[in-house]
Image (spheres, helix red, strand yellow):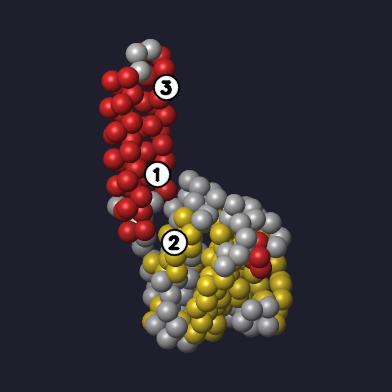
Amino acid sequence: MFHKEGHKIILFTLFAVVACFLLTDHFVALFWLRTIILITLLVFLILILQFFRDPKRHTILDDTTVVSPVDGKVVVIEEVFEKEYFKDKRLQVSVFMSPINVHVTRYPVSGKVLFSKYHPGKYLVAWHPKASEENERTTVVVENATYGKVLFRQIAGALAKRIVNYAKTDANAVQGEDSGFIKFGSRVDLYLPLDTKIDVSLNQKVKGGESIIARINN
């Protein structure tokens, strides 16, 4: 299954690869060169297909947990001052996505969307310290009746050239459901209450919509 954001790109790529296959087979006489070109085209098509894959995830709805919004690796767990919305200290958990990860963004909690804003910006590498403030990004805040307010921020990386955000203010968010897509590499930051119990560790690999990032600290 492929994400709807990739349908046009996949179709265009498929036509282009088939055309190049036919041209190469017809005009390139050297067997070794023809083989290299054909293999390269095939690998390119496979990379595009795997990038836009949208595997089904089985989210266990739970208002006491925050699930990972994306696939990737946890690269930041720290207390920070969140400047845009909360304007106070929060626990930040950041997940970095490589180009081979699934790039669907999912709601980390269920609730009401209180805030959704797009910011144009730069394309620094996603792990750059200033990426969360200077790169192209979107900020979404969802309020859960049990957990409280959770902010998640899609951040474009050096390769990402388009962020898609489906979250609309006052809409109802469902934990684990599709909230957007980031094309070609990036990261997502979560900002959680200070009394949250973090359930992941640095460099841990997580799955969007399934891996539990944090729980209410009872």
Q: Which residue is mark 2?
A: 181
Residue 213 place in picture, x, y as percent: 55, 66
SS category of the residue bearing label 3: helix
Question: Badges 2 and 3: C-beta atoms under 8 Å apart?
Answer: no
Alpha carbon separation for disc pair 2 and 3? 33 Å
Residue 66 place in picture, x, y as percent: 51, 71
SS category of the residue bearing label 2: strand
Task: Check disc 2 and give the amino acid type.
Answer: Phe
As rendered, which of 187 and 58 lies closer to the eye? 187
Quarter that holds the C terminus: bottom right
As rendered, which of 11 and 42 lies closer to the eye? 11
Q: Quadrant of residue 177?
A: bottom left
Crowding at mark 2 (Cα within 10 Å: few <14, some 14-19, many 20+): many
Earlier along the polypeptide chain: callout 2 or callout 1? 1
Crowding at mark 3 (Cα within 10 Å: few <14, some 14-19, many 20+): few
Q: Which residue is mark 1?
A: 48
Q: Which residue is mark 3?
A: 36
